[in-house]
Amino acid sequence: MTYVQSEQITCAECDLTLQLPDLAVGEKALCSRCGYLLTVNHPQAIEKILAFSFTALIFLVLALSFDFISINYQGQTYTITLLDTYFRLTEQDYLIIALILVLTVVILPIVVISTLFYLLFNIKAQQYPYKGLFIANALFALLPWSMAEIFLIGVLVSVIKISTLTSVDLGLSFYAYVLFAISYIATHSYIDKNYLISILQKLKLKSRSSTEHGILSTSIQLNKEIEKKNNIFRDNGIKDNEQSQYRLNKHSIQKTWALLITAFLLYFPANLLPIMATRSLGKEEFNTVLGGVFVLWREGSYPVAIIIFIASIVVPIVKFIVLAWLNYSVQKQEVHFQLERAHLYRITEFIGRWSMVDIFAVAILASLIQLGTAMTIHPGPAAIAFCSVVILTMLAANTFDSTLIWRKKNSHE
């Protein structure tokens, strides 16, 4: 994985275009303005991605083939498979939560792995895949919504809750899913967006040039096109592309406000209404998100209580505050604390998805604890509201245009 000296690269977060130097094996390139990780020179990156993704696919198939979790209650054993979570939630008329769970935990990882196979095998064969750039961009848009590692934390939280009621056994599928998650995370660690897009652009240009010209050098033509588009920089290979860097996305601010306000309105029912209902021996008990934290704390499950409190209470509030401040600051064209705002945005975008821990925990509990008159657990009305809050805040972070942080005041006028 080697870059030529003349290659240009544009930072995805501040829109600064830089000339990329040669990178030694293991070296990474950071944006000189905002500190964003541009690319990393992973040795044999394609081969490692293929190996880890193939391993992940095998473990995922195994995780779908055996028992996931079982409990022993009053001499009877109750077992669920990974896909049973979907069917049992559907039976309880929680189709939205069931779909979100199966999409983020099973379907999207399969789609991501299949897409990687399609792109990388074509790249290995030195041919441009059909709709390669479009599919690659779709791949990177899907990556944040694949939540294997978050689901595992949710499972562990539910297991700790169940263990206070009865004995719990983890099946072969659970351990297979753990290995799948490890392999899947390893796959992610070697995926480099700029590198992948760069290769696909060159292959597309090579395919086009071989059809139209036949003998034109692909690398020379690519550099000429980049030079024409970006007006190659003269001072140490770096120049601010004013036109692209300070473009004003007139709709991103409004979209972010709309998503944030909607999420904020849903945050109240998500926390005031019960997220889980437990019926035991004719008595029904309702737990809100915060109430569940208190119950765990009283039972001595301090680490789990802290995890749920941070993921379900603190993280959404922090996201509201930070995204609202960021959106307001770009709307008012603030030019102060640009680097700090860029770092805050990066952190906020990363942590937002972890709020799904509580939803996954409730889904496992509702799927497994169906013991007739002895005990049943169902998701409460807050579950859908809370899930909507997480999704809407993630979308708000995605629609926020971080390049506007670096826009010069009134530069769009």
Image (cartoon, rainbow, N blue to C red):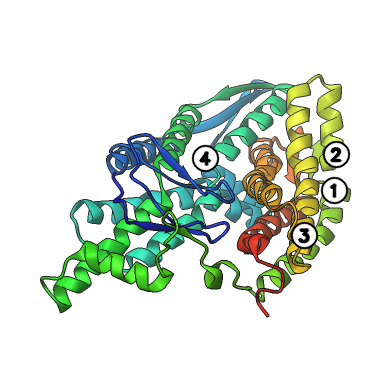
Which quadrant is the C terminus positioned in? Answer: bottom right
Distance from disc 3 to disc 4, alpha carbons, whole Å, reads 30 Å
Nearest-to-viewer mark from 2 and 3: 3
Residue under the point 51% across and 67% down: 241
Residue type at numbered disc 2: Leu
Residue 119 at least partly seen: yes
Residue type at numbered disc 1: Asn
Residue 70: name its quadrant: top right
Q: Which of marks 4 and 2 is nearer the N terminus?
A: 4
Distance from disc 2 to disc 1, alpha carbons, whole Å, reads 7 Å
Task: Look at mark 1 in the image and give the residue it sits on.
Answer: 271
- Badge 2 element: helix
User: Is residue 311 placed above or below 380 in the rendered structure?
Assistant: above
Distance from disc 1 to disc 4, alpha carbons, whole Å, reads 28 Å
User: Is residue 95 placed above or below 257 in the rendered structure?
Assistant: above
Label 3: how many Cα within 10 Å (few below 14, some 14–19, many 20+): many
Nearest-to-viewer mark from 3 and 4: 3
Label 2: how many Cα within 10 Å (few below 14, some 14–19, many 20+): some
Q: Which of marks 1 and 4 is nearer the N terminus?
A: 4
Which quadrant is the N terminus positioned in? Answer: top left
Task: Look at mark 4 in the image and give the residue it sits on.
Answer: 82
Residue under the point 31% across and 49% down: 3
Residue 235: name its quadrant: bottom left
The answer to whether residue 26 is left or right of residue 337 is left
Query: Could you tell me if the residues under marks 3 and 4 are in contact, i.e. CB atoms within 8 Å?
Result: no
Task: Look at mark 2 in the image and give the residue it sits on.
Answer: 290
Tell which of 311 and 385 is nearer to you: 311
Query: Could you tell me if the residues under marks 1 and 4 are in contact, i.e. CB atoms within 8 Å?
Result: no
Task: Look at mark 3 in the image and give the residue it sits on.
Answer: 263
